[in-house]
Image (cartoon, helix red, strand yellow):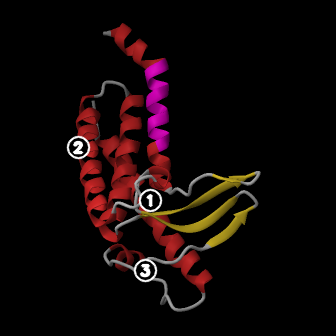
Amino acid sequence: MNKIPYLILIAVSIVLDQLSKWAVTQHMIKPALRSGYGEPLEFWPWLTTVTAHLPFTSIEILPFINIVMVWNKGVSFGMFNDGGEMGALILIALSLVIVFVFLIWLFTADHYMQRLSIALVIGGAIGNVIDRARLGAVVDFIDVHAFGYHWPAFNIADSCIVIGVFLLIIYSFFFETQTKDVK
């Protein structure tokens, strides 16, 4: 089975994640702060430079969606946020081990739905590892809220991971039995 489309999906997930973080930090958050944080950087200098952490900022996009500036030093929903530099290194190492295991799984998976799901999880994980390695924290910027409740801020990489896991669950309920029956 041709795995190239899934490797392309991984690359596209990473690029979209990094481009979205660049666009938000450099062209929405920085201008909203008005001064003291320099001019917005172009994409490549931003990606290859360790930039200062911008302060929390919130910009309303729709009545239920804000663009915010959140530095997540932990994992999902801010868990383990106080791990310091050693915590960041542990999370990077753990993420890379998971990516490696998922890559092996990708190359042995039989079903397209499984490969699609795994590729999304890998792309999202690598997108967040890039942030953690460059900046010591993951850039989260999407704030969804309704009726006084705010979902924890997230990013495109987080979305890829969640969608990938959701599709794996769908696969396990609806497709895995079909795959086993065929064998």
Magenta-tinted stretch = 162-173
Residue type at tag 1: Asp
Q: Residue furthest front?
A: 82
Residue at coordinates 33% horizontally, 77% vertically from top-left? Answer: 50
Query: In the rendered view of the protein, which quadrant contains the N terminus?
Result: top left
**3 or 2: tag closer to the N-terminus:** 3
Mark toward the viewer: 1 or 3: 1
Query: Mark 1 or 3 closer to N-term?
Result: 1
Give the residue at mark 2.
Answer: 100
Residue 2 visible in rendering: no
In this rendered view, identify the residue nearer to me: 170 or 135. 135
Using the image as rendered, state which of residue 143 and residue 177 is in the foreground.
Answer: 143
Q: Is residue 165 magenta?
A: yes
**Residue under the point 39% across and 65% down:** 137
Indicate which disc, 1 or 2, sits on the residue closer to the N terminus: 1
- Mark 2 Cα-neighbour bin, 10 Å: few <14, some 14–19, many ≥20: few
Residue 134 image point, x, y percent: 31, 69
Indicate which disc residue 151 carries.
none
Left or right: 21 as drawn, with respect to 148: left
Any mark on residue 17, and which? Answer: 1
Residue 88 colored magenta?
Answer: no
Calculate the distance from the C-alpha at mark 1 to the C-alpha at mark 3.
Answer: 16 Å
Callout 1–callout 2 Cβ contact below 8 Å: no
**Label 3, label 2: how far apart the Cα atoms are:** 31 Å
